[in-house]
């Protein structure tokens, strides 16, 4: 009897037919003319021969076989998922080059403004060619599944670096921020404002190069329709790193908002926490507008005052008081490093890794349980950092977009996916239309996103900030009985006068 598991492998098209049959022949010969009886053993044999990844095997063991192939690419693993997309590690089936693929959720593609925003992101990323920016290679669609092919960079984002290793040494922090500033300067020169600079969007590879990623909120200067469209979004970005003017209206913020956010990122690298880590989103946004960040000396009393001054100027509330260009930030940090006998490392060197567009182990931040091994970035010399406090930052979550295959059949009825590995024997029968592998991760996310979410207008009113208690209008309750008693007394006096 043919193995049900091996039948799923064949139907998934993950392994070329000739290669699979050759491997099975060799495997049979090693086991006295028989295949391993356990599907788990068969899966491990395929993984050991580099014919399947663990992620692929888990899905196949759960009875899933649809959605592994997307256009010219074979999906290898799920790197991460978030509110607007899912990111996969994939391999070009002919060139064998590993890339990261950002896939849109199928149910959102019907929204023309959402799809247009995705295309704008791709167009923005395609304009950029800099060693400190993750490159975008291609945008395509497979049926109604739309995706962006990006450079795959194996490493850790700076949020994870600090969370795992603690605050950085001073030279390392200056080096990494200078590299981001170089990439940012290139983006600004090309007419792009990033608008979501934060540690999680700064990826450190194994060679010490920092790459800026996620141009998803980028605004094309002079193209106001690029992100406004029909999205009705006045505030875009991340509350912990958002410039004061960007909190009021993201679409009117210019490149100097990125410099403020980069300063907040430097603050995080030095202290292990954002400038205002406590409070609700609206409270943190308000603090960015009206309060000075606590001194870095509180966390790092040995910090060089000259570096603190650079960070403070980057985070100036007034845009005119900040450095005016990212190039200026790069220059001042490069000079600061030179004065200390160091230099900006990694930047300016083209990566020779077998990578392609955006994405990497950085997305472990979104799906810690699915992370692939990350290369550790080296830290520069200097005063040692302290251990990082556990971040209170909420974990974001993404889902997968739909990849559809052949039409549903009775034997395919178990193909609606659940992220947790399970077997067809123990899974309940699915109800509703057949879904593909890519749709599975979106299923749980849809449940989360259906919960009522308050808008910025509900949570943040600059005229009535959190804790504000203005004058109260209306008639106090005690007035009514007093007035009643007074009226009765007046009537009694009038009656007494009339009677007399």
Image (spheres, grey):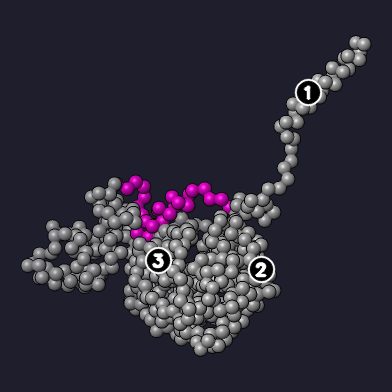
Point 21% across, 64% down: residue: 43
Point 7% across, 67% down: residue: 32
Q: Residues within 10 Å of mark 2 (few under 14, many from 20)?
A: many
For marks 2 and 1, give the CA distance: 57 Å
Point 47% across, 52% down: residue: 449
- Tag 2, which secondary structure? loop
- Residue 407: name its quadrant: bottom left
For marks 1 and 3, give the CA distance: 71 Å
Q: Which residue, given by chain and number where applicable, does mark 1 sit on?
A: 485
Q: Residues within 10 Å of mark 3 (few under 14, many from 20)?
A: many
Q: Specify start and end residues of the magenta stretch as a single range.
A: 429-455
Point 10% across, 64% down: residue: 34
28 horizontally vs 56: left or right: left
C-beta proximity under 8 Å, tags 2 and 3? no
Can you tell which of label 2 and label 1 is closer to the viewer?
1
Can you tell which of label 1 and label 3 is closer to the viewer?
1
- Tag 3, which secondary structure? helix
x then y, percent, for residue 245: 65, 65
Residue 409 in view, yes or no: no
- Tag 1, which secondary structure? helix
Give the vertical position of 131 relative to 473 (above or below): below
Q: Which residue, given by chain and number where applicable, does mark 3 sit on?
A: 364
Dot label at residue 317: 2
N-term-proximal mark, 1 vs 3: 3
For marks 2 and 3, give the CA distance: 33 Å
161 horizontally vs 8: left or right: right
Residue 382 in view, yes or no: yes
């Amino acid at each position: 009897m043919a193995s049900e598991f091996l039948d799923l492998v064949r139907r998934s098209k993950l392994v070329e037919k000739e290669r699979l049959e050759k491997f099975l022949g060799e495997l049979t010969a090693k086991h006295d003319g028989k295949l391993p009886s356990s599907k788990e053993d068969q899966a491990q044999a395929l993984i050991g021969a580099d014919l399947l990844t663990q992620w692929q095997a888990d899905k196949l063991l759960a009875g899933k076989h649809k959605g592994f192939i997307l256009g010219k690419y074979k999906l290898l693993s799920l790197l991460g998922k978030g509110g607007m997309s899912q990111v996969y590690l994939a391999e070009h089936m002919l060139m064998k080059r590993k890339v990261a693929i950002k896939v849109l959720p199928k149910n959102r593609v019907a929204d023309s403004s959402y799809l247009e925003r995705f295309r704008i992101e791709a167009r923005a990323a395609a304009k950029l060619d800099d060693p400190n920016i993750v490159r975008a290679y291609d945008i395509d669609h497979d049926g109604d599944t739309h995706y962006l092919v990006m450079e795959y960079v194996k490493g850790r984002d700076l949020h994870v670096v600090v969370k795992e290793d603690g605050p950085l040494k001073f030279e390392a922090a200056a080096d990494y921020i200078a590299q981001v500033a170089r990439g940012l300067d290139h983006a600004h020169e090309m007419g792009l404002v990033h608008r979501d600079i934060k540690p999680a969007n700064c990826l450190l590879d194994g060679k010490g190069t920092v790459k800026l990623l996620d141009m998803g909120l980028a605004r094309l200067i002079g193209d106001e329709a690029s992100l406004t469209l029909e999205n009705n979004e006045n505030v875009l970005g991340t509350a912990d790193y958002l410039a004061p003017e960007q909190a009021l209206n993201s679409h009117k913020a210019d490149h100097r908002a990125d410099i403020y956010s980069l300063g907040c990122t430097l603050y995080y690298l030095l202290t292990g926490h954002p400038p205002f880590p406590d409070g609700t989103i609206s409270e943190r946004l308000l603090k960015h507008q009206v309060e000075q960040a606590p001194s870095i000396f509180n966390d790092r009393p040995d910090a060089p005052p000259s570096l603190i001054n650079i960070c403070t100027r980057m985070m100036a509330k007034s845009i005119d008081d900040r450095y005016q260009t990212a190039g200026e930030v790069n220059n001042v940090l490069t000079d600061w490093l030179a004065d200390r006998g160091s230099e900006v490392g990694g930047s300016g060197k083209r990566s020779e890794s077998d990578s392609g567009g955006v994405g990497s182990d950085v997305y472990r931040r979104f799906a810690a349980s699915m992370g692939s091994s990350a290369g550790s970035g080296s830290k520069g010399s200097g005063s040692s950092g302290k251990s990082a406090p556990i971040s209170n930052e909420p974990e974001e979550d993404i889902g997968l977009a739909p990849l559809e295959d052949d039409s549903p059949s009775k034997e395919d009825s178990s193909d609606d996916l659940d992220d947790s590995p399970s077997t067809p024997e123990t899974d309940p029968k699915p109800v509703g239309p057949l879904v593909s592998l890519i749709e599975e991760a979106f299923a749980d996310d849809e449940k989360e996103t259906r919960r009522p979410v308050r808008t910025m207008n509900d949570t943040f009113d600059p005229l009535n900030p959190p804790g504000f208690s203005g004058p109260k209008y209306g008639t106090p309750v005690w007035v009514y009985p007093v007035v009643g008693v007074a009226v009765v007394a007046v009537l009694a006096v009038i009656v007494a006068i009339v009677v007399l």
